[in-house]
Amino acid sequence: MTSASTPASVARTGTGSDSGTARATEGGARSGTAVAYLRHAAGKLAGAAVSLLAVLVTSFFLFRIIPGDPVKTMTHGMPTTAEQLATLRRQFGLDLPLWQQFTDYCAKALTGDLGTSYQFRAPVGELIAQKLPATLLLTGTAVVLYSALGLWLGTRSAWRHGSLGDRLNTGVALTLWSVPSFWLGLLLIIVFSVGVGPVPGLFPTGGMESGTGETGLGYALDVAHHMVLPVLTLVAVGYAQTLLVMRSSLLDEMGGDYLTTARAKGLRDDAVRRRHAVPNALLPTVTMVFINLGHVAAGSILVETVFSWPGLGGLFYQALSVPDLPLVQGLFVVFAGAMIMTNLIADLLYPLLDPRVGR
């Protein structure tokens, strides 16, 4: 009996050993993947920190070369004495040496204090917080719309490469991409607002609301009515880039052997595109989408100015015309910081979308 039971026990022992070895190998692979991802994330976080530091340095020195005296501009041509101008410069710290202004600026910025606006005599952080919701509403809506439109049309154009629809989509996208956004906005105002076009007065010429005092649904519809032309401008100019990137990326994937194998297994063409081709073509487009999301905080200076939209873009234009150095610097830091953070999120998502990234 002992000799008969020995092979079985050996077999069971061997099977358990093989299973344990397989689990250990799988656990080691997962651990290695986690370590590789953490190393990748640490490198990207360090790069983002260096970029933010570079933004602080650039935002201080870049706008110091803008011609004009902000103190004299604040007086709006009113008669002022040399003593009064000196008092204003001392009040805003403009009489200090440049290196001391820089160290004070960095010390305050690292604590979240972006200074006080010369023009509005209010903290820069409060001014940005007041204008940010309007910008997020306008550009956020536009980015979601033109990213979705670009992905959809780019996928269809690539899958039907060379067809009439592909040539038409690509031609329209390239044309709109080359059009300046402010020019297109002015054209839409002429056609749909001021009475030159076939449907005069259909949409307001600018602003965010009519000021009629409506609340609830009436107010929401009023804001949506004012958003139509600026959103249409941003979508028309912005969707082309996403379309062209998605189209190019998907065309590169369409020659892959794995698509031929998927078709040979009997999958329909729509399933091959949706399950296999599009996911593998998304990486470059993910970068584009996150770059567009970074633009949400910055808004569109030209479009917001053309349509008198009360957001960060219009605020930046006002600050630049003074020049209101603390406000310009604060907005520049917010704009650049938003771009850095969205690119960081994209970099951290890459290894999750494609395990080959970061190894």
Image: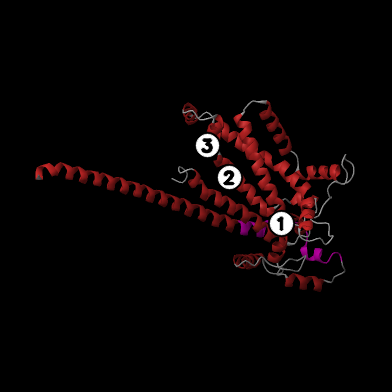
Q: Neighbour class for label 1 at 10 Å: few (<14), some, many (≥20)?
A: few
Q: Is 107 placed above or below 164 here? A: below
Q: CA distance from mark 2 to mark 1?
A: 33 Å
Foreground of the two, 352 or 56: 352
Q: CA distance from mark 2 to mark 3?
A: 20 Å
Q: Earlier in the sequence, mark 3 or mark 1?
A: 1
Say if mark 2 contacts mark 1, CB within 8 Å.
no
Q: Mark 2 belongs to which amino acid? A: Thr
- The residue pinned by badge 2 equals 287
- The residue pinned by badge 3 equals 275
**x, y percentage for residue 80?**
85, 70
Foreground of the two, 9 or 77: 9
**x, y percentage for residue 291?**
62, 47
Please check the rendered image and state whether residue 73 is part of the magenta-colored stretch, yes or no: yes
Q: Is 31 placed above or below 326 here? A: above
Q: Earlier in the sequence, mark 2 or mark 1?
A: 1
In the drawing, what numbered circle is on residue 65?
1
